[in-house]
Image (tube, coloured by chain):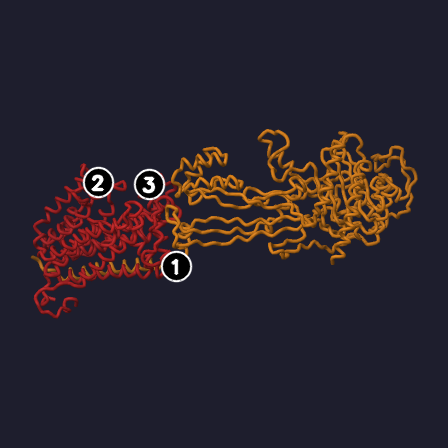
């Protein structure tokens, strides 16, 4: 038998040392994992062990200036399945199919998906949720949350908008004030084993939801309702395509009503009135949801003469008493531009020309200003920019490029043709011109209020942007008062009030189609305007002159709301 | 040093520190198996002590065997060296017969009344066989011929374990034991350095090639394991799943651990939690301190082996201890390396601690052998 040699001992020690070195290396690796990577893996492990259940935040309501709730919440249920806890999958599938009226395929996919929690359907009515709960099925969770509910159905649909399946704002105010309305969802974190069974000792972490703030609007539900009623009436009687009515305060830009009939039912926004092929449904829905007051542009027509008049008065190229003569047309370069009155208005002053809505007068005034100046005023008045209204999707102005503008283009622009702006742009610009000359931002949102009634945000819409002088504004008001009192806008006259305004009629493109847009813009009181209303009737049948069909709408509106507003003002002043 | 401790100047030495380390490891292993498996056992077997009872029985049997073997002079076993080699080969082939048991997609077990893993027996047989052969070869082991002869003799068992029982990890361990024993027996270094360099270079080249290949097709499951090793989070639901779950467990243990029994990962998240992956549960429950303590215990164990091997009365005894030392060292290093994703995933259990009856029994028999060698140390020789 051989004795172990020295080299054996050396080698045994070598083996030991090599092993020890490896152990030290591994120990280092363990230290790295457990000290430096600990947080990373701990977080991942926690995500794996914890099942998240969202607690929806209550969405803030939308409330008008009188305190009437326009968008509210209703309790509904969300049905979810927890794969690992389901004991009778077939029964679960059968019950959920029946109660939720879903296809078996859809439900089966959710039930058989291996995940910690899978949502089957949300926005289920409380009755159905209670019914499902009564089956006491393992692995089926019924969570209550809130669904948007609009008490007035169609009222102000185009400005309120609606919410989607997850209660997120999709259109209009619901979308633009999303960050204030949505609140913050809460979470229930349950620790579970791999089968999804809750570990009771671990308890649950609960992060409470923060409910959204209520949004207070400048809108007045009474005015909105009355304006809607008037719009519907005139749409029906004139067999018009659509009618928009905008009511705003010219002094601060607050919108009191914005109607664009036909409106749609906010509680059922995906149902079209008519049958449409499936592939065209989305287009038809988008069309139905469009708010023509801000999403669409049109040729403003004669109402734009207010802008031409303002620029000319401000620049001093015309005075009220300047004499003009209208033969029924005017020749600009080699083009003959006709007046609405073919026989011509004959001799008239500038004020009379405005009262008559005489095209040759305004073409002449426009040409006096020249392209350069006219364009400068167009920009100064804010007509090239968007108004900045707090509704999404505002359309921009479609205007000639300055370098492409010749005398003919200038002439047509002077009486409101050959370019397009949105109704809200027209109303805002006219408001700014008659309010003393300050550009305003039209808006609906006034402030947000939390659940305790404390004001959380007050929106500021103030601008210090003067676009014309105080005196020009005053002169403009009195000319426009004359238009209503004795001129083409006399159908807008309201007994006992001093109303200013301007009518407009424009033929839509292509010309000669017989499709017209009639409109009237009016404000009162003429000396110190408190309210401005714009009524636009698209494609009316029969008489289409703005002075004949749109002005009476505004008159009826004013007859009702002017006393109402005075009373409101009185109460307000008394209150403060 | 250790030998001098005994005040009793009687002729034989008994390594009490080794015994203590072994008992501690077996006891600690049982505690951890119970902690790691109780949930799984109650879900699967409706008896949360199922794995504990089975392992406890095997450990008790193993401890009895250990003491018996420790009392038998180790030279008694020398005559069974060749027989053991042949029996191992036969047992491996028996796996292919109806006696074989298939589990987890691999046929590795034999039903001999109790279930036995031939690979575990082959490890012990290889240690005994090589110790005897090298001892008999004498000086010839120094020659190139002797060097290759040993490797050629060891190769068949490795290949059989790898190919027949589809157990690459055990094949690697057996090959490692053989190389280590040869390393100690031979005075040469050069050959081993060359051999080692070739091995490392080959492995590195393979990993590089697999990492560069654009598709996973044709790589087989071992290729995918290598990709999963390089980036377990990218293969989280496939080959990287187990590794990632182990890392979650280790990482979430932190410095002081969650406390004994408080592991979350053992609740069905981590596969093989009482088996190959038990080290990660130790880390999760006992923290960095627990993990390092376990590594330290194994270092101590190997240190005892070194002391005994260096003082063994003869080369045969020394080689037996070296074989056992290699067996345990390789297995512990590979296991911890796998669990910490230091090397690609392959199934290797942690000696004494992981669940596995055959494994703990044969390990304890090997411990008996080492103790028997230790008894041969005459204190005056030390």
* Depth check, front residue: B24 or A19: B24
Q: Is residue A303 above or below residue A527?
A: above
For the point 78% across and 44% down, which residue is it?
A560
Judged left or right of residue A80, residue A458 is right
Q: Is residue B291 left or right of residue A353?
A: left
Residue at disc 2, secondary structure:
strand
Residue furthest out toward the bottom? B7
Q: Are marks 3 and 1 on the same chain?
A: no
Label 2 and label 1: CA atoms lie apart by 43 Å
Outermost residue toward the front?
A134
**Chain letter for the part of the structure drawn in red:** B
CA neighbours of label 2 inside 10 A, class few (<14), some (14 to 19), many (20+): some
- Label 3 lies in what chain? B
Task: In the rendered structure, find residue B219 and report the number of the disc placed on it.
Answer: 3
Q: State the residue in front, A345 or A135.
A: A135
CA–CA distance between discs 3 and 1?
33 Å
Q: Is residue A14 visible?
A: no
**Tag in front: 2 or 1:** 2
Judged by depth in the image, the label closer to the viewer, 3 or 1, is: 1
Q: Where residue A478 sits: x, y (%)? A: 86, 48
Q: Chain of mark 1?
A: A
Q: Position of residue A516 (x, y in %)?
A: 76, 33
Chain letter, colour orange: A
Residue hosting label 2:
B101
Q: In which quadrant of the rendered image does the N terminus of chain B lie?
A: bottom left
Mark 2 or mark 3: whose residue is earlier in sequence: 2
């Amino acid at each position: 038998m051989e004795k172990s040699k020295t080299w054996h001992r050396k080698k045994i020690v070598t083996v030991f040392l090599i092993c020890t070195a490896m152990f030290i290396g591994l120990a280092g690796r363990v230290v790295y994992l457990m000290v430096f990577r600990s947080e990373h893996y701990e977080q991942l492990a926690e995500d794996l062990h914890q099942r998240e259940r969202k607690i929806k935040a209550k969405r803030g309501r939308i409330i008008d200036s009188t305190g009437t709730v326009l968008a509210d919440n209703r309790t509904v249920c969300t049905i979810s399945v927890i794969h690992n806890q389901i004991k009778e999958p077939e029964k679960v599938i059968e019950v959920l199919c029946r109660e939720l009226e879903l296809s078996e395929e859809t439900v089966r996919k959710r039930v058989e998906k291996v995940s910690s929690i899978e949502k089957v359907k949300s926005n289920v009515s409380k009755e159905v949720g209670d019914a499902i709960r009564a089956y006491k099925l393992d692995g089926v969770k019924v969570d209550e949350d809130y669904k948007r509910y609009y008490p007035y159905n169609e009222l102000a649909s185009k400005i309120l908008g609606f919410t989607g399946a997850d209660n997120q704002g999709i259109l209009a105010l619901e979308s633009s004030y999303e960050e204030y309305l949505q609140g913050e969802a809460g979470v229930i974190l349950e620790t579970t084993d791999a089968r999804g069974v809750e570990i009771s000792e671990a308890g649950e972490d609960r992060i409470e939801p923060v409910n959204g703030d209520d949004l207070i609007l400048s809108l007045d539900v009474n005015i909105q309702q009355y304006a809607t009623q008037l719009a519907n009436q005139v749409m029906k009687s004139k067999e018009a395509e659509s009618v928009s009515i905008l009511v705003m305060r010219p002094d601060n830009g607050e919108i009191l009503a914005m109607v664009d009939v036909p409106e749609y039912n906010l509680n059922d926004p995906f149902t079209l009135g008519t049958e449409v092929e499936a592939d065209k449904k989305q287009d038809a829905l988008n069309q139905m949801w469009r708010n023509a007051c801000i999403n669409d542009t049109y040729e403003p027509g004669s109402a734009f003469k207010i802008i031409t008049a303002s620029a000319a008065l401000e620049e001093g190229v015309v005075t009220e008493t300047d004499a003009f003569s209208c033969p029924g047309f005017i020749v600009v370069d080699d083009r003959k531009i006709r007046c609405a009155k073919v026989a011509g208005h004959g001799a008239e002053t500038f004020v009379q020309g405005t009262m008559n809505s005489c095209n040759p007068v305004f073409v002449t005034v426009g040409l006096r200003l020249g392209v350069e100046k006219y364009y400068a005023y167009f920009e100064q008045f804010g007509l090239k920019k968007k108004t900045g209204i707090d509704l999404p999707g505002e359309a921009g102005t479609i205007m000639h490029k300055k370098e492409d503008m010749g005398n003919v283009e200038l002439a047509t622009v002077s009486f409101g043709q050959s370019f397009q702006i949105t109704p809200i742009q027209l109303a805002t610009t006219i408001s700014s011109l008659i309010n003393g000359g300050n550009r305003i931002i039209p808006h609906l949102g006034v402030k947000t209020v939390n659940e305790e009634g404390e004001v959380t945000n007050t929106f500021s819409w103030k601008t210090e942007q003067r676009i014309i002088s105080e005196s020009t504004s005053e002169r403009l008001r009195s000319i426009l008062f004359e238009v209503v009192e004795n001129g083409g806008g006399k159908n807008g006259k309201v007994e006992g009030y001093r109303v200013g305004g301007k009518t407009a009629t424009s033929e839509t493109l292509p010309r000669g189609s017989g499709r017209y847009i009639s409109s009237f813009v009016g404000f009162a009181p003429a000396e110190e305007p408190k309210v401005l209303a714009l009524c636009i009737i698209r494609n009316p049948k029969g008489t289409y002159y703005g002075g004949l069909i749109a002005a009476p709408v505004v008159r009826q509106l004013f007859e009702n709301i002017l006393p109402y507003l005075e009373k409101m003002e009185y109460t307000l002043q008394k209150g403060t | 040093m250790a030998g001098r401790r005994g005040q009793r100047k009687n002729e034989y030495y008994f390594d009490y520190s080794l015994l203590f380390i072994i008992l501690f490891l077996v006891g600690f292993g049982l505690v951890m198996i119970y902690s790691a498996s109780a949930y799984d056992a109650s879900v699967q077997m409706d008896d949360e002590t199922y794995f504990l009872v089975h392992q406890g029985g095997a450990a008790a049997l193993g401890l009895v065997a250990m003491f018996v073997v420790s009392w038998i002079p180790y030279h008694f076993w020398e005559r069974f060296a060749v027989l053991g080699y042949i029996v191992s080969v036969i047992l491996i082939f028996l796996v292919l017969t109806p006696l074989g048991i298939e589990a987890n997609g691999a046929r590795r077990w034999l039903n001999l009344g109790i279930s036995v893993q031939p690979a575990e027996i082959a490890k012990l047989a290889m240690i005994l066989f090589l110790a005897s052969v090298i001892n008999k070869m004498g000086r010839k082991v120094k020659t190139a011929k002797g060097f290759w002869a040993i490797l050629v003799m060891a190769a068949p068992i490795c290949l059989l374990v790898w190919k027949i029982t589809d157990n690459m990890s055990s094949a690697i361990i057996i090959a490692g034991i053989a190389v280590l024993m040869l390393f100690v027996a031979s005075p040469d270094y050069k050959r081993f350095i060359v051999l080692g360099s070739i091995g490392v270079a080959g492995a590195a080249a393979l990993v590089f090639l697999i990492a560069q290949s654009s598709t996973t097709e044709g790589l087989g499951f071992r290729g995918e394991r290598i990709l999963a090793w390089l980036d377990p989070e990218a293969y989280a639901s496939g080959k990287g799943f187990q590794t990632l779950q182990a890392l979650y467990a280790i990482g979430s243990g932190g410095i002081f651990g969650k406390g004994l029994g408080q592991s979350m990962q053992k609740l069905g998240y981590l596969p093989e939690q009482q088996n190959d992956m038990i080290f990660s549960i130790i880390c999760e429950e006992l923290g960095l301190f627990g993990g390092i303590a376990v590594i330290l215990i194994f270092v101590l164990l190997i240190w005892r082996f070194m002391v005994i091997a260096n003082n063994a009365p003869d080369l045969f005894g020394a080689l037996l201890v070296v074989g056992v030392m290699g067996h345990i060292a390789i297995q512990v290093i590979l296991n911890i390396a796998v669990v910490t994703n230091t090397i690609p995933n392959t199934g290797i259990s942690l000696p004494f601690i992981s669940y596995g009856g055959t494994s703990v029994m044969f390990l304890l028999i090997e411990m008996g052998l080492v103790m028997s060698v230790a008894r041969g140390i005459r204190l005056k020789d030390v």
